[in-house]
Amino acid sequence: MFKALLMDLDDTLIKSSKMYDRALEFASYYLAEKNNLKLTEFFPIVKRKDTLIRKNFPTVHTRHSRILVYRHALEEAGVNYSLSDLPTAEDIYWEFFDENVSLYDGVFDALKTIRTEGVKIAVVSDGDLRGRIRKIEAVGLLPYIDQVFASEETIFEKPFSAIFTLALSRLKVTAGESIMVGNNYKNDIQGAQLVGIKGAIFNPSEDGHVEGQDPEVVADYEFAHYDELPEIILRS
Ligand SMILES: [Mg+2]
């Protein structure tokens, strides 16, 4: 039995990927209206800038910055925008995301069962701490977990080991007593395995978003539904 369960957040606990585009468009609509731009022309610029920011800031949490996406998009659109629109657009983005994102089936029951057995549960996620906690709170998960660790606290994102070792030391467990669950082979599974933590990949049949596949990375466990997770954590 493991003593600590480390959980990735996006596309592992919550269905994030399907919400990012919708949130991006929702906040783009606000900026388009305010600046007399056509959404059909402005949104494609926003999408391009979103891809650009993600690529230009690998491994640091700046790549998740939406305020930079909107700033670059407005500048390319050539409008004389108000600076105060930038944080507002970012707030609109995250409010929309938090209000509409949903959990995968069975998360509550699985975490409850696992935690009742004395296993510590922590979310280990790339991004800023404020955003991680807000997302977890929005889906009602805060009472089911013990801790949240964000890459902001360690500068570099997964698979760099700092966020994993931070989680181990704060939870007072060893790598051998811990397991990481995620949807990304490279960041979650390999990142954990490099410090001696076992890795379980979450690959659901519906709304799945497995990424980072690499022939050299083999997950120690794989599951498709949360009702399989307690067995892995408690009987291994
Ligand atoms: Mg993920």
Image (cartoon, helix red, strand yellow):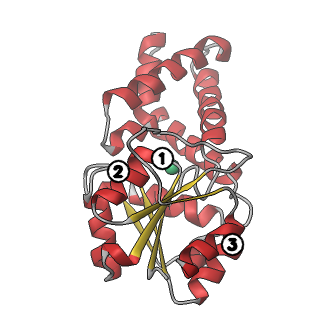
- The amino acid type, in three-letter code, at marker 1 is Asn
- The amino acid type, in three-letter code, at marker 3 is Phe
Q: Nearer the viewer, residue 212 or 19?
A: 212
The disc placed on residue 184 is 1
| x and y, in percent, of residue 84 in the image | 45, 36
Name which of mark 3 and mark 1 comes first in the sequence: 3
The disc placed on residue 219 is none
Question: Is disc 1's CB within 8 Å of ligand 1?
Answer: yes
Task: Mark yes or no: residue 49 visible.
Answer: yes
Q: Disc 2 versus disc 1: distance between alpha carbons?
A: 10 Å
| x and y, in percent, of residue 85 in the image | 49, 33
Q: Disc 3 versus disc 1: distance between alpha carbons?
A: 22 Å
Residue at numbered disc 2: 158
| x and y, in percent, of residue 21 in the image | 62, 32
Residue at numbered disc 3: 108
Name which of mark 2 and mark 3 comes first in the sequence: 3
